Image (cartoon, rainbow, N blue to C red):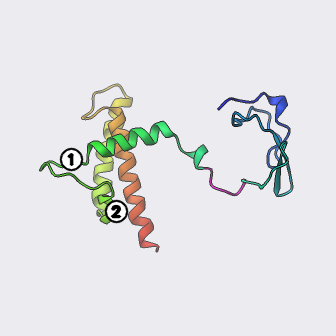
Amino acid sequence: MPIMPRNKVVCVDDFSYETPIAIPDEGLTYSGEGNIRKFNTGATRDTDRDKLDYHGFLSPIVLKRYAEYLHKHRIQSDGNYRESDNWKRGIPLDTYIKSGLRHFIDWWLEHDGYESREGIEDALCGLIFNAMGYLFEYLKKGE
């Protein structure tokens, strides 16, 4: 997705931007008026100001690497193949925190230039898994 020059974007959702904004290849520019976005094509949409921006919040290269890590760990020590959503069946919070801390130590070791059990990418993916699993269990309690 190319970055549009500053002078091509007038206003976005009632906020003027001084830095370039990524716009799809169609090169559409738009200006915000109240709660409506009006594109130079004439199309209109509500503002996205209060909508979750998954595209901005997440990175496809990180999600891909995380999925590769999870896939690698689907084969269990007994040789059986674990379903991808097996973790959603429930894992105790203590298990997540203990495993997460081991991965955190590996991350820290790698950060400080020391060798870890698994390398920095696996350490980070393991940490993400444990944080996500912990949050999943925590959120389930609130249902």
Badge 1 local density, few (<14 within 10 Å), some, or many (20+)? few
Q: Position of residue 24 (x, y in %)?
A: 69, 37
Residue 25 higher or lower than 96, as above or below: above
Look at 12% across and 50% down and name the residue there.
78
Among numbered discs 2 and 1, the one appearing first in the sequence: 1
Q: Nearer the viewer, residue 30 or 50?
A: 30
Query: Residues in magenta?
Result: 49-53
> Looking at numbered disc 2 in the image, what kind of residue is underneath it?
Lys
Q: Nearer the viewer, residue 108 or 126?
A: 126
Q: Is 52 a magenta residue?
A: yes
Residue 93 shown left or right of residue 143 in the figure: left
Q: Quadrant of the N terminus?
A: top right
Return the mark for residue 75: 1
- In contact (CB < 8 Å): disc 2 and disc 1: no
Q: Main secondary structure of the magenta part?
A: loop
Look at 13% across and 48% down and name the residue there.
79
Residue lying at the far bottom in this picture: please name it.
143
Residue 25 shown left or right of residue 80 in the figure: right
> Looking at numbered disc 1 in the image, what kind of residue is underneath it?
Ile
Residue wearing tag 2 = 88
